[in-house]
Image (cartoon, rainbow, N blue to C red):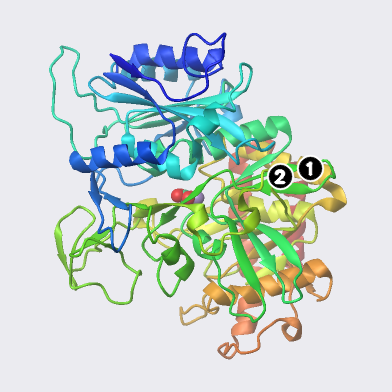
Amino acid sequence: MTVMFSEAPRSAEHVAGPTRSPSANEWVAQMTELLQPADVHWCTGTSDEFDLLTEKLVQEGSLVRLNSERRPNSFLARSDPRDVARSEERTFICSERPEDAGVTNNWRAPDEMKAELTELFRGSMRGRTMYVVPFSMGPIGSPLAKLGIQITDSPYAVISMQIMTRMGTEAVEQLGPDTEWVPALHSVGYPLIDDSGVRRDDVAWPCNDEKYIVHFPETREIWSYGSGYGGNSLLGKKCFALRIASVLARDEGWMAEHMLIIKVTSPEGRVHHLAAAFPSACGKTNFAMLQPTLPGWKVETIGDDIAWLRPDDDGRLRAINPERGFFGVAPGTGVDTNPTAVATIWGNTIFTNVALTVDGDIWWEGLTDTAPERLADWQGRPWMRGLPAPAAHPNGRFTVPADQCPQIADEWDDPQGVVIDAILFGGRRASNIPLVSEATDWEHGVFLGATLSSEQTAAAEGPVGKLRHDPFAMLPFCGYDMGDYWQHWLDVGEELGDNAPRIFQVNWFRKGADGSFLWPGFGENSRVLDWIVRRLEGSVSAVKSPAGSLPIRDEFALDGLELPAGAWNELFDVDPAAWLQESEQTTELFDRIGATVPKVLRHRLTRLRWDLVSRL
Ligand code: OXD
Ligand code: MN
């Protein structure tokens, strides 16, 4: 076995490995013994390393280098068709007690799971290189940042982690002898040499039919086996920055949330920072990169997926984006719908499961109005315009450094983060939920977050259009019991007191009786931002409703927008009968979560139901 050491710093007392952390060095040594790789590579995160790895993957047929005139330093990966998304049903929270994982998570006893997985991991890197990937979630040295080390046998995961996190030497330098760090073990589960020493050829996208995405919240560990895709293999993202971090946050008095962060500047030049939680597939990246149609307004991007929020010394809530890149859904990202994202991916981008054009560039449904006549589809098969199957996989992705975004805010990587003025919750709702409403107070805001729901968009999730409750957009990402998590939100609100951000609910997706969208969305959502900011500034009023405080038409920026007749009323209609029916589903959700649902939220629900009954 050859061990290649990085340029990571070595101190005089340093002996066992290339970090100053004995626990990190020991873990890597133990894992090397278990996984039995052919060699070990400590990642430095340099561009030379990126070039070497991408070139190796191109030579091996795992990446296609794109036309360097059209898309410099960019690559296309095609996954195994059985490994195309996060595997929620194979995601586990292994707390000591099942009730600490809660009913919304798959639970397994940690010892049992470790025993089972240890056997799968034993020898799983035979014939392969084991990469050691030190990384920081959050700007290097930020008081809000956290460190991790991922071990992986997927060079695709390494180059993706290089884009998505602060990875390599700069992260190792943060790791002192006593610094806390999260071990994140990953193998695609496709050893090249079997137990009897027989070798097999590699494949373009190695993976295993048996998949496990496992979290040990008490010991802050991640073990992921069998998948090379997205959140299953880029362990800094959903596994660390949400599932493990939500537990760290609960224990340390902060919040790890599935939220984008934007900076909004009003025509008067006043700046506000907003964080917004939307379930997956609700256009989060589009909103994070919004180009306002309303004159004078400016929106800049700070993050598109995850926010870490912590009360600062002045008692205000500060947020960082713990990531360094965007792992965006490609289909539906287009010149019309998100020109900023299209400009962001000009180069230095890894594309996964999208179509390839004849001149070596990429394409997907929605990138342009008309598909090129001929393409290679996401599996590399010939494709012609007019074929019924999409050319790109619906969960095809782009992985790109955040600082390539033309509207990235200067403070996007400020180690101190930004003060959050408002929090938004949004889902994809054809009915019931108004375009925008303001929570009457923090507790009501928590109720809105807890009851957040969205219609399913992909048949894989269940019947399309069916309502799925996704509290705080955290259903697949909360590392502990959902009721305890709601209580944590209430506790943080109490600590923040008058400094707490105001909370709003938004819904761009409401439909009229004829099934068409009532609101144009995209850049026109700046009109909603205008109302929210005016509320923060105290310059517009509102009317009370069971949904919270609603805008008054005359005070809402509708100039230059042709809303269909009756659309305003439909956008804000709160039908007591339909709401009462929906509240039954909320009761079911609360009952399912059980005894940990905070009493104040149950009381809210009862009060809401009385209010609705009185309006029938
Ligand atoms: C994502 C998700 O990929 O939420 O960001 O599923
Ligand atoms: Mn997400």
Q: Is residue 570 above or below residue 404?
A: below
Tell me which residue sits at (56%, 46%) in the image. 474
Q: Nearer the viewer, residue 206 or 171?
A: 171
Distance from label 2 to label 1 (Cα)?
Answer: 9 Å
* Quadrant in which the C terminus is drawn: bottom right
Place of residue 155 in the rendered image (x, y in percent of width and height, measured from the top left): 32, 35
Q: Quadrant of residue 505 in the image? A: bottom right
Whether residue 33 can be seen here = yes
Residue 201, quarter of picture = top left
Residue located at (47% from left, 24% from top)? 108
Apparent side of residue 300 relative to residue 365 in the rendered image (left or right): right
Q: Earlier in the sequence, mark 2 or mark 1?
A: 1
What is the x, y in percent for residue 414?
A: 66, 48
Residue 130 x/y as whole percent: 34, 24
| Marker disc for residue 99 | none
Please tell me which residue lies in front, 263 or 49: 49
| Residue at 26% across, 43% down | 82
Instruction: Single out the mark in the foreground, 2 or 1.
Output: 2
Label 1 crowd bin: few (<14), some (14–19), many (20+), radius 10 Å: some
Residue pointed to by mark 2:
416
Front-lying residue, 563 or 296:
296
- CB within 8 Å, label 2 to label 1: yes
Q: Is 181 positioned to the left or the right of 543 in the image?
A: left
Given the image, on which type of amino acid does mark 2 rest? Gln
Query: Where's residue 358, x and y in %?
Result: 17, 65
The tally of labels here is: 2
Classify 566 as above or below 357: below
User: Looking at numbered disc 1 in the image, what kind of residue is underneath it?
Assistant: Asp
Query: Secondary structure under badge 2?
Result: loop
Question: 167 and 447: which one is in front?
Answer: 167
Dot 2 crowding, Cα within 10 Å, few <14, some 14–19, many 20+: some
What residue does disc 1 label? Answer: 312
